[in-house]
Amino acid sequence: MMVSDIPAGPACGRVTLLGAGPGDPELLTIKGLKALQGASLLLYDALVSDEILALAPASAERLYVGKQASRHALPQDEIIALMLRLAREGRSLVRLKGGDGYIFGRGGEEAIALAEAGVPFDVIPGLSAAQGAGASAGIPLTHRDHAAALVFATGHLRADGQGIDLDWAALARPRQTLVIYMGVGTLALICRELVAHGLPADTPAAVVERATLPDERCITGTVTTLPQLALEQRVRTPALIVVGSVVGLRPLLRQAGAAT
Ligand code: SAH
């Protein structure tokens, strides 16, 4: 009999799905800190910083399961299989993800697998990159005079490489702020589609790279100029794209002493 066939029983471990926040370790929640301090086993992703990992006891086992090409990593189904196996063996673990696990973090898939397997789990939210970027770059994501709606979207290309699966007409609507995750590689396509679907070509837009970390950069322009600016400035992932007139508030609100 394989371990995966063993039903979750009373001796089953507990899984804590923990959002580590956008980067600055101090933006971890108190609940998250307590979970880390009590952890004996961590499964963590690429965007989780060493400072956050250091908050767990030195004796805690740390397994990297992220998806960064240069480091050893597991496909999503293997991460889930590993989590279930460990829990069934009686190991309690903290599953650490960047930002919030339920926002473009595949936390939903992992929680569903745990629920279906009968493995007890908790979910501790984290500040998502959008919230961190808004605060540190000086871009309030909503403002009564600018945006009555806030949309989080993915800029990830479809599996067949043929564009991005988004409702462009909805994203191009006025009086909203659009935050795009995973959109650095597709920035030009995103800006082109938004304008083609009616967003004014002079709409302010920003890219916030490594938000809340000491080397954060924010580059601002419009949906017409931003792709070229980002290319010239060699913007790299992780970075968020923020589109909407709230970006125009940054000159007043950027944090004093910020480098860019
Ligand atoms: N669950 C995470 C998102 C994971 S998807 C969250 O809630 O924040 C990965 C994408 O998140 C990156 O491609 C980038 O777009 C964004 N991201 C994560 N951390 C970031 C950071 N510190 N600065 C800017 N963008 C970040």
Image (tube, grey):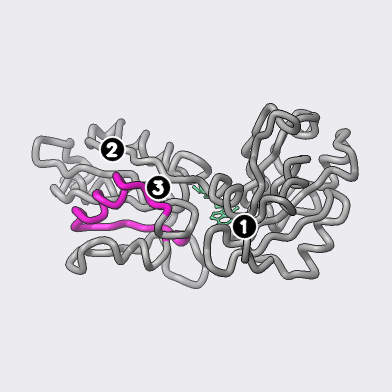
* Mark 1: amino acid: Gln
Of pointers 1 and 3, the one earlier in the residue sequence: 3
Residue identifier under label 1: 255
Furthest residue in direction bottom, as rendered:
70
* Mark 2: amino acid: Asp
User: Percent x, y for residue 119?
Assistant: 23, 37
* 88 vs 169, nearest the viewer: 169
Cβ of mark 3 under 8 A from ligand 1: yes
Of pointers 3 and 2, the one earlier in the residue sequence: 3
Q: Is residue 187 inside the magenta stretch?
A: no
Estimate how packed mark 3 is, as few (under 14), some (14 to 19) or many (20 or more) residues with alpha carbons within 10 Å: many
Residue 66 shows in this picture: no
Secondary element at image label 2? strand
User: Percent x, y for residue 54?
Assistant: 30, 66
Q: Name the quadrant of the N terminus.
A: top left
Label 2 near label 3: C-beta < 8 Å? no
Residue identifier under label 2: 122
Q: CA distance from mark 2 to mark 1?
A: 35 Å
Q: Could you tell me which residue is drawn at 42 percent across and 39 percent down?
A: 109
Q: Which residues are magenta?
A: 27-48
* Mark 3: amino acid: Gly
Estimate how packed mark 1 is, as few (under 14), some (14 to 19) or many (20 or more) residues with alpha carbons within 10 Å: some
Residue identifier under label 3: 19
* 241 vs 42, nearest the viewer: 241
Q: CA distance from mark 3 to mark 2?
A: 11 Å
Q: Quadrant of residue 9?
A: top left
Q: Is residue 204 above or below residue 10?
A: below
Secondary element at image label 1? loop
Q: Is residue 117 above or below residue 64?
A: above
